[in-house]
Image: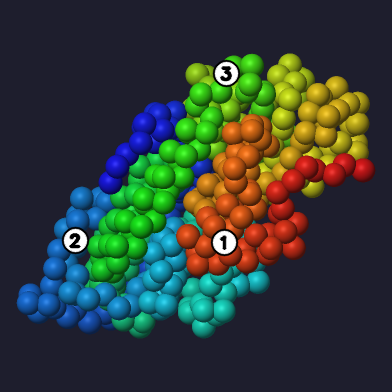
């Protein structure tokens, strides 16, 4: 798979965005009596070997027809068109699903009778081995570290394939999609999707890389979603979206060499010192920003972006791990606001719908986001 210079640059400069969900999270290992699980040795003629992201050799049946998807893999199997093969998954309860968790939202009807056999909420991984065994899946897919993978495998006596959590601006998303595609026999779909992602990232770079410094307005990414919602002080310092469009990110220029975290809380005085021309906020923090403005209008009146109505919102891209399709859509939207001339040959709404359709097979997600309040546009302050 072709790797663009853009991806290499961002690989060096960015970390995986997460919302309290990572491989370092606390893990709850269920106490399952292994003696209750029947140990059935598969016939060698029906086996093939897959190497997962941990470098493990995993023996699988020649054809995988049923999947238990844990961690971030429900999202990946959706991208690969495998949602119908899911017989069990980890995730959130159906009444908590919103359009911001796009893969789960588009599968609500399809998965309404699929049992939840685990969760990764609030950074705590939990899975139910006995329930998984009863489902008799051909394979268990997950995004867990070695100790958790071995625990699941020992308790279920089923093949477990682990892949990386995945972020659109790091190489691990490609590896994850390719491994799952190999497991499930949909390599062509993975190739199609990865080529689309690479082409899109290259397109974003080509549209913005040649702009002169005085053509790049200053910007910060605020109200960032990390370990919950934040107000305007929640700054995404190493914002991969701003990097993808070569934006003049003042937070990165100031704090990029000091901070190891992708997003941090900063003092309000620092925001005044930056005084960017544009501010883009995660939808999840917009209400906090609006409440703050109503409480402390004097602070906002000092901001050039507020004075010029250049404080915008976009859908949060980190609901239950990183939503690749929303990240890519956000990059096109923000790029079109910062540099409209560079994007004047496309209709951004149509491009966003195209992205959602490519990833999810669902163009109506944009309307669902709008109805939910997570639209693309300027924030309306009272």
Residue 338: x percent and y percent?
A: 66, 32
Query: For this view, does 14 lie left or right of residue 57?
Result: right
The foreground one among 247 and 155 is 247
| Front tag of 1 and 2 | 1
Up/down of 261 relative to 155, above or below: above
The foreground one among 200 and 255 is 200
The foreground one among 371 and 36 is 371
Please report the residue visible at 81 percent of the width from the left and 24 percent of the height from the top: 304
Query: For this view, does 238 lie left or right of residue 273?
Result: left
Residue 333: x percent and y percent?
A: 63, 43
Asked if residue 24 can be seen in this view, the reply is no
The residues tagged by marks 3 and 1 sit, at their Cα atoms, a distance apart of 36 Å
Please report the residue visible at 80 percent of the width from the left and 43 percent of the height from the top: 379
Query: For this view, does 240 lie left or right of residue 370?
Result: left
Asked if residue 260 can be seen in this view, the reply is yes
User: Which mark identifies residue 62?
Assistant: none
User: Which mark identifies residue 212?
Assistant: 3
Mark 1: secondary structure: helix
Residue 347: x percent and y percent?
A: 63, 49
Residue 371: x percent and y percent?
A: 74, 63
- Tell me if mark 1 has few (under 14), some (14-19) or many (20+) residues whose alpha carbon lies within 10 angstroms of its own: many
The residues tagged by marks 1 and 2 sit, at their Cα atoms, a distance apart of 29 Å
Residue at which label 2 appears: 50
Nearer-N-terminus badge (2/3): 2
The foreground one among 97 and 281 is 281
Please report the residue visible at 50 percent of the width from the left and 26 percent of the height from the top: 209
Residue at which label 1 appears: 102
């Amino acid at each position: 798979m072709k790797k663009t210079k853009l991806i290499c640059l961002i690989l060096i400069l960015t970390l995986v965005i997460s919302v309290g969900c990572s491989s370092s999270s606390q893990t709850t290992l269920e106490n399952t009596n292994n003696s209750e699980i029947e140990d059935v040795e598969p016939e060698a003629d029906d086996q093939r070997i897959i190497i997962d992201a941990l470098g493990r050799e995993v023996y699988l049946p020649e054809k995988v027809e049923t999947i238990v998807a844990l961690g971030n893999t429900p999202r990946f199997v959706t991208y690969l068109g495998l949602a119908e093969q899911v017989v069990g998954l980890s995730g959130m309860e159906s009444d908590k699903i919103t359009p911001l968790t796009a893969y789960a939202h588009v599968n609500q009807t399809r998965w309404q009778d699929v049992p939840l056999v685990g969760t990764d909420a609030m950074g705590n991984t939990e899975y139910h081995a006995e329930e998984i065994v009863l489902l008799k899946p051909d394979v268990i897919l997950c995004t867990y570290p070695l100790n958790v993978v071995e625990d699941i495998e020992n308790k279920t006596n089923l093949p477990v394939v682990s892949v990386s959590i995945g972020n659109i601006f790091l190489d691990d998303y490609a590896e994850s999609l390719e491994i799952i595609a190999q497991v499930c026999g949909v390599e062509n779909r993975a190739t199609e999707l990865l080529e689309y992602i690479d082409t899109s990232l290259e397109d974003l770079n080509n549209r913005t890389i040649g702009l002169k410094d005085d053509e790049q307005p200053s910007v910060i990414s605020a109200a960032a979603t990390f370990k919950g919602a934040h107000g305007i002080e929640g700054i995404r310092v190493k914002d991969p979206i701003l990097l993808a469009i070569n934006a003049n990110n003042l937070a990165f220029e100031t704090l990029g060499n000091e901070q190891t975290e992708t997003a941090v809380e900063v003092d309000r005085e620092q925001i005044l010192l930056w005084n960017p021309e544009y501010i883009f906020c995660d939808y999840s923090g917009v209400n906090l920003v609006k409440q703050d403005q109503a409480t402390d209008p004097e602070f906002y009146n000092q901001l050039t972006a507020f004075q010029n109505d250049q404080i915008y919102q976009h859908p949060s891209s980190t609901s239950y791990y990183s939503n690749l399709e929303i990240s890519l859509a956000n990059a096109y939207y923000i790029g079109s606001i910062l540099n409209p001339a560079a994007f004047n040959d496309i209709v951004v709404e149509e491009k966003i719908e195209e992205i959602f359709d490519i990833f999810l097979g669902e163009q109506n997600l944009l309307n669902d986001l709008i109805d939910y309040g997570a639209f693309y546009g300027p924030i309306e302050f009272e």
